[in-house]
Image (tube, rainbow, N blue to C red):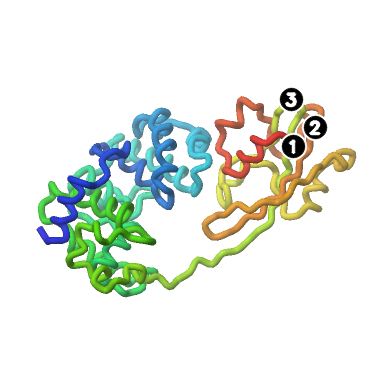
C-alpha cells in the first residue's frame, strides 16, 4: 500500500467519522441514498431527511412503489429536486432491471438514473470493496493539495487527469477500500476544509505539496465561474378564511419541476389580470424576498388574497391545512404557507 493510502486508512479507522447513520453499513440502498442526499448539501441538513426517508421507504422496493408526489413531499426543503425525481426513477430501475438488487460493479451502477461516476464509485467501493476512486468536491480538494495538482479542474480534460491521480492513490488490498474511501471523504470534510484547513492534524501532511508550500488555499484551481442570473416572480397566495390554500403543480421540467406552488406570474400586472376584477382591491402585497438557486436568484413577490369560499380559481386545486404540509413544496412556498395571510 502507498504511504498516502496507508496513512489515510489508519487515520480513518482511529479518528474518522463513525457515527453518521449511513456509516458502518454495506447496504447499497442506504449508501446510495446518503450519497444522493449529500450532493451539494451539508451533513447536518441531511441527517433528518435521511432518517425520515428510511422510515417511509425502508428499502428500494418501497421507494420504487411510492408515488412521486410522496417522494417529493419528503424531499421538500432539501433543494435540487431533480435528485428526488432521479432517486425515484433509479429505485424503479433497480426493481425492474435488477430484480430489486443493486448491481455491484461501477459500470452497471452508472447505467442507473442519477448515478454518476463518483456516486457509482462510492457505492462500489464502500459496499463491495471494488478498487475505484471517488472524485467529489472534498476528494478533489484533498488530492489537488496533496499532489500539488495545479491544473484547472473545471476543464473536463484536466478532471480526467485528476481521476488518473485518484486511481493511482488507491490501496492495493480490496478489503481496505471501504476505510480508504470513507477516510478521504472524512479528511476533506473535517480537516482539509475549504477555508482554515487543520493541516497540523492531517495524517498525510508529511508529503503534502500544499502543506510544504504553505498555500493550501491555492487548490483546487478552478477558474470557470458560475454565471448567475436573477428573475422576479409574483406569487398569488390565495386562501380561504378556513385556511385552505390554492396550489398548482409545476410542469415536469424547469424551476421547481413537478412541485406544488402558488400560481406564479412574471409581473404584478399579470397576477392582477388573473384575479376577478371584483376581488382585486382585496389583494395585499408583501415585501419581496430573495430565494437563492444554484445559478439564479429568485426575487419573490407574495400577493395575498383571502376568499370567502373554495371557488375554483384558475388551474389548480384547494388543499387543506392537513394536506399541504406533506406535499412536495419548494422551501419558500412552504415558508409562505406557514405564514398567516
Residue 134 shown left or right of residue 239 in the figure: left
Residue 30 shows in the view: no
Pick whichever of labels 1 and 2 is earlier in the sequence. 1
Of 188 and 275, the residue lying toward us: 188
Q: Which mark is residue 278?
A: none
Image marks 3 and 2: residues in contact by CB distance under 8 Å: no
Residue at x 26% of width, y 68% of height: 211
Residue 267 placement: quadrant: bottom right
Residue 306 placement: quadrant: top right
Of 45 and 101, the residue lying toward us: 45
For numbered disc 2, what is the local secondary structure? strand
Q: Quadrant of the N terminus?
A: bottom left
Residue at x 42% of width, y 48% of height: 42
Residue denoted by label 2: 307
x, y percent for residue 291:
60, 52
**Disc 1 from disc 3: Cα separation:** 12 Å
Q: Which mark is residue 238?
A: 1
For numbered disc 1, what is the local secondary structure? strand
**Rendered position, 267 above or below 239:** below
For numbered disc 3, what is the local secondary structure? loop
Image marks 1 and 2: residues in contact by CB distance under 8 Å: yes
x, y percent for residue 240:
76, 29
**Disc 3 from disc 2: Cα separation:** 9 Å
Residue 237 shown left or right of residue 230 in the figure: right
Residue at x 61% of width, y 44% of height: 332
Pick whichever of labels 3 and 2 is earlier in the sequence. 3
**Rendered position, 203 above or below 217:** above
Q: Which mark is residue 242?
A: 3
Residue 171 shows in the view: yes
Amino acid at each position: 500500500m502507498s504511504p498516502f493510502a496507508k496513512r489515510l486508512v489508519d487515520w480513518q479507522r482511529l479518528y474518522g467519522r463513525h457515527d453518521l447513520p449511513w456509516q458502518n453499513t454495506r447496504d447499497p440502498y442506504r449508501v446510495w441514498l446518503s450519497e444522493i442526499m449529500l450532493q451539494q448539501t451539508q451533513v447536518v441538513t441531511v441527517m433528518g431527511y435521511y432518517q425520515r426517508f428510511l422510515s417511509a421507504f425502508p428499502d428500494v422496493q418501497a421507494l420504487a412503489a411510492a408515488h412521486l408526489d410522496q417522494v417529493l413531499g419528503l424531499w421538500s426543503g432539501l433543494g435540487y429536486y431533480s435528485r428526488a425525481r432521479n432517486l425515484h426513477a433509479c429505485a424503479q430501475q433497480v426493481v425492474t432491471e435488477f430484480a430489486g438488487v443493486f448491481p455491484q460493479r461501477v459500470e452497471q451502477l452508472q447505467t442507473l438514473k442519477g448515478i454518476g461516476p463518483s456516486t457509482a464509485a462510492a457505492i462500489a467501493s464502500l459496499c463491495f470493496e471494488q478498487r475505484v476512486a471517488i472524485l467529489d468536491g472534498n476528494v478533489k480538494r484533498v488530492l489537488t493539495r496533496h499532489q500539488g495538482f495545479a491544473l484547472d479542474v473545471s476543464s473536463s480534460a484536466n478532471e480526467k487527469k485528476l481521476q488518473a491521480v485518484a486511481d493511482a492513490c488507491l490501496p492495493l488490498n480490496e478489503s481496505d477500500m471501504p476505510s480508504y474511501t470513507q477516510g478521504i471523504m472524512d479528511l476533506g470534510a473535517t480537516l482539509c476544509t475549504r477555508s482554515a484547513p487543520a493541516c497540523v492534524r492531517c495524517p498525510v501532511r508529511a508529503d503534502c505539496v500544499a502543506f510544504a508550500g504553505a498555500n493550501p488555499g491555492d487548490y483546487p484551481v478552478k477558474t470557470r465561474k458560475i454565471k448567475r442570473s436573477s428573475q422576479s416572480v409574483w406569487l398569488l397566495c390565495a386562501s380561504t378564511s378556513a385556511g385552505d390554500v390554492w396550489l398548482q403543480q409545476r410542469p415536469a421540467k424547469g424551476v421547481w419541476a413537478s412541485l406544488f406552488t402558488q400560481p406564479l406570474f412574471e409581473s404584478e400586472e399579470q397576477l392582477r389580470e388573473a384575479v376577478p376584477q371584483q376581488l382585486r382591491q382585496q389583494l395585499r402585497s408583501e415585501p419581496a424576498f430573495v430565494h437563492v438557486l444554484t445559478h439564479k436568484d429568485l426575487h419573490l413577490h407574495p400577493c395575498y388574497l383571502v376568499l370567502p369560499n373554495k371557488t375554483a380559481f384558475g388551474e389548480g386545486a384547494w388543499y387543506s391545512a392537513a394536506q399541504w404540509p406533506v406535499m412536495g413544496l419548494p422551501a419558500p412556498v412552504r415558508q409562505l404557507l406557514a405564514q398567516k395571510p
